[in-house]
Image: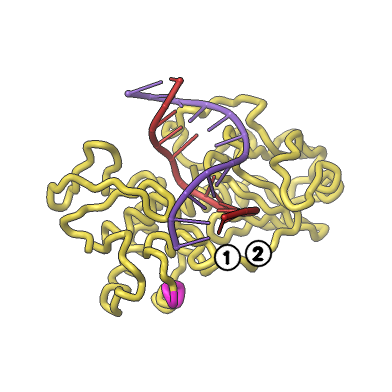
Chain colours: A yellow, B purple, C red
Amino acid sequence: MPEILEVEAARAVLEARALEREIASVHAPDTWFLKRGTTPESVTHALLGNEFVAARRRGKSMFVDTANGPVLGLHLGMSGRVIVDDVEAGDPLIYASNQRIEAWHRFGVRFVDGGSFMLRDPRRLGAVELDPDESRLGPDALTLTYKQLDHALDARTAPVKAVLMDQARVAGLGNLLVDESLWRAGVDPVHLPVDLDTDARKNLHRAIRSTVRVLGRRGGSHTGDMPRGPDAVCPRDGTPLQRRTVGGRTTYSCPAHQH
DNA sequence: GATGACCTGTGA
DNA sequence: TCACAGGTCATC
């Protein structure tokens, strides 16, 4: 269930292990997984005999460049994992469904040297696409500047949480990272951007930066300080956390210190 | 902008 | 059996 931190870990595994290896065969058994006109035939044609030369990322989307030109777009959806030669990014213990079930390998390639890259996704909400449109994403959350955040909030009438999760405004933040960031910033998820003054926005920017940096170092989006669950209590002031739906997602926040 | 849909696994 | 899951998309 990847947000930007997990996707970056997956990208790093691809970069470290999957580049400059000739592709011997393409595994694309699930046409549902191939989006926007990409077919098993077209992706096989694009990759066979080719090799990956770079693994890029913007927000939660990955773009793998190939020597012959085509770009392989990858998205992990809610449950996707990248596996190269049986090495996968992140902490496997977090996931109960961590088994090597062949049917969960929705896409992949086998290299001439005998190794492989596989995208495992039990829920099939991930995606593979040739030459994806890379322009529809906002600025990347890992390098988000104050100015970019300020602009992202501009003229929005949705709750600040919904804006932060809108990938066209800021790319990479998901449900957990946004809840943690807002908790750290002391901002109520339903607060409207128009009501956030410069101080509040600077504070929010600092909170987003510290959230992605600290949680990245700890090992993932689930390692935040704000607990989730029916009996969750704010570690800052001991207040029982509030559970709501905001922006269509389950949202936890502290009614005492998030305004 | 909010809602439901997509798909499938896990745990209560 | 049900509610829930770290994402995105079409639809009203």
Q: Residues within 10 Å of mark 1 (few under 14, many from 20)?
A: some
Q: Is residue A148 visible?
A: no
User: Which residue appears at 34% of the width and 58% of the height?
Assistant: A211
Residue A54 location (% of width, % of height) = 67, 57
Is disc 2 surrounded by few (<14), some (14 to 19) or many (20+) residues within 10 Å? few
Q: Is residue A197 magenta?
A: no
Q: Which residues are magenta?
A: A151-155
Residue A97 location (% of width, % of height): 50, 28
* Residue identifier under label 2: A134
Residue A18 lies left or right of residue A78; in this view the side is right
Looking at the picture, does residue A96 appear above or below residue A233? above
Secondary element type, mark 2 = loop
Q: Nearer the viewer, residue A190 or A205?
A: A190
For the residues bearing labels 1 and 2, Cβ distance under 8 angstroms: yes
Magenta-drawn stretch, dominant element (helix, strand or loop): helix
Residue A103 location (% of width, % of height)? 66, 27
- Disc 1: host chain: A
Is A188 displayed left or right of A140 in the figure? left
Return the x and y of residue A27 as percentages of the image width and height.
76, 36
- In the rendered structure, the answer to whether residue A81 lies left or right of residue A233 reads right
* Residue hosting label 1: A137
Tag 1 and tag 2 share a subunit: yes
Hey, what amino acid is under mark 2?
Glu
Q: CA distance from mark 1 to mark 2?
A: 7 Å
User: Which residue is drawn at the image coordinates 48% and 50% (left, top)?
Assistant: A3
Question: Could you say which disc has been placed on residue A124 in the image?
Answer: none
Residue drawn at (46%, 52%) of the image? A5
Query: Tag 2, which chain?
Result: A
